[in-house]
Image: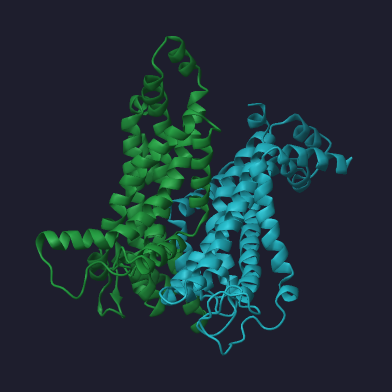
Amino acid sequence: MRVRDLMRFWRRYAQNRAAVVGLGFVGFFATISVLAPLIFPGDPFAFGPETFNSPSLEHFSLMGTDDLGRSILGELLYGGRMSLLVGLASALSAVGIGIAFGLLAGYFAGFFGEAIMRVSEIFQVVPRFFLALILVAVLGPSIYNIVLAIAITSWPVLTRIVRAETLSVREKEFVEASRAIGETNVYIMFSEVLPNVLPPVIVNASLLVGQAILTEASLSFLGLGDPSAATWGYMLYNAQPFLRYAWWMATFPGLAITLVVLGLNLIGDGLNDALNPRLRQL
Amino acid sequence: MNFIIIHLAPGDPVSRIAGEFATPEYIAMIRHSFGLDRPLYEQLGLYIYNILRGDFGYSYYHQQPVLTVIASTLPNTLILMGPAVAIASLAGLFLGVASSRKPYSLTDNALTVFALGGYSLPVFWLGQMLVIALALELGLFPSQGMVSLRTEQVGFSLLIDRLHHMFLPAAVQVIWQLALITRMTRASMLEVFREDYIITARSKGLPERIVVYKHVLRNALLSVVTVIGVNVQYMFAGAVLTEIVFAWPGTGRLFYGAIYARDYPLLMGLFIVISLAVIVSNLIVDLLYGYLDPRIRLIS
């Protein structure tokens, strides 16, 4: 039964060819990130004697070396791990906070719900990127603070969506029914309401991962990256002083970010088409 | 007028913002001196009070009042952003309309790919690539700065020199924003095309051009304007990042220097000024919205 549902969902998703391509991009980078130690044995951050090697087919110099003689390919593989992890962790945290507050605000509308919405409105008036920048600058540029800052500035969007959906689901008969048989509020919120508000959350989550990767790259580029956890954005930051000497230092990490984010955006579009019944009829 | 009031409703933005970002800093200070939270609240109060009076503190890196430092660089950012936003908006509308007239045609697909790509790439990376290709390889444009340093220029040649330096950073902004606006225009155009009054307009025998521009575009414009308003903050972020690639002496460089020097008063000041700029532009967009949509004017 479950498998058949999944198959049906996949067929609907696969109708959008661009979405399949997107999944391919993301899948490719996820795979090489996981397999990084196999593809690139040895320490990718060890300094080497040959600095500014241009890309060639010689051993592990496929994408050239940087100012300290490190292989760009190795940095790219391991940087991808960090970039993807930061994107995923930030988006998941934002989704967690967003769902919790959204469910509460929608289910317990009234003073409490209003209070949550006012707080989320303040976050929407303030420019998000700059708030994240200030947070990381003040808390210190560690990878955890970067994830925290991105999550703190991203949850209000999800809270609004979840609250709006919750408000309408709350009035449905099946919720009334489970209230009538005496289920607790917590049970109703998580088992009855939550599954029904998930589709738009899933679509937004895939877009959020992409945005988080871009935000992290931008923060790194401003000098707020974590030097002990080099991401693709941090590589671009390193490349900036050497644009004149080493085009490869900037080109490859940027290309990787673009393809992953593009992939995630395409997946978001595809999920939206597959999950949104209203659009499907058109 | 209701519209403005709703937007002013979250209270005085300045004090809200100050409270919000001041907290982490104060948390750090609390760590130093446990249990001394009440005087800190007073300090926070004093900080807010000072900001309301227009005193943003003293930048210890630049050895000047924060507001003076910001005021000397903000115009450079606006010079870069203003024309870029204008060009991108007009061109984006045009391309979006072109894209929506024949959905899933070759033109539409090409434009969609362009828009999606532009939307997905880091804006500063686009800058880096243009620097490498056009400035360093082909030598068409200067890669850094706002004016040529070697020669003293006045009048017309200064203007030409400025425009020459401006071209690449502005082009980065335009390409990046164009992608977004094209995408949004296409989506809202397609939505309006499905409305009943468009079928009516067509069945009246109106020429397609009039239907597209007078009926569809006028209505689609509303949501496009909203989207531009919502994205003003990202345009600022994009400008700040682009400035760093091109060593453009605007707020972006200021941010970079302030982060490097841990100049917190300057960082806070920049944050407040940019937040205010974003809020004011959103307000302008709301007013524009009322002007474009008679329905809203009638209600208020």
Location of the C terminus of chain B by quadrant is top left
**Residue B33 image point, x, y percent:** 49, 83
Left or right of residue B1: residue A40: right
Outermost residue, right side: A1
In which quarter of the view is residue B66 placed?
bottom left
As drawn, the chain in green is B
Residue in the foreground of this view, choosing between A136 and B228: B228
In which quarter of the view is residue B104 placed?
top right
Question: Which residue lies at the image location 55% right of the left edge and 67% below the top edge?
Answer: A252
Left or right of residue A79: residue B154: left
Location of the N terminus of chain B by quadrant is top left
**Residue A11 image point, x, y percent:** 77, 38
Question: Which residue lies at the image location 60% right of the left edge and 79% below the top edge?
Answer: A71
A272 vs A83: above or below: above
Outermost residue, left side: B155
Outermost residue, front side: A57
**Residue B122 image point, x, y percent:** 49, 60
As drawn, the chain in cyan is A
Give the colour scheme shown.
by chain
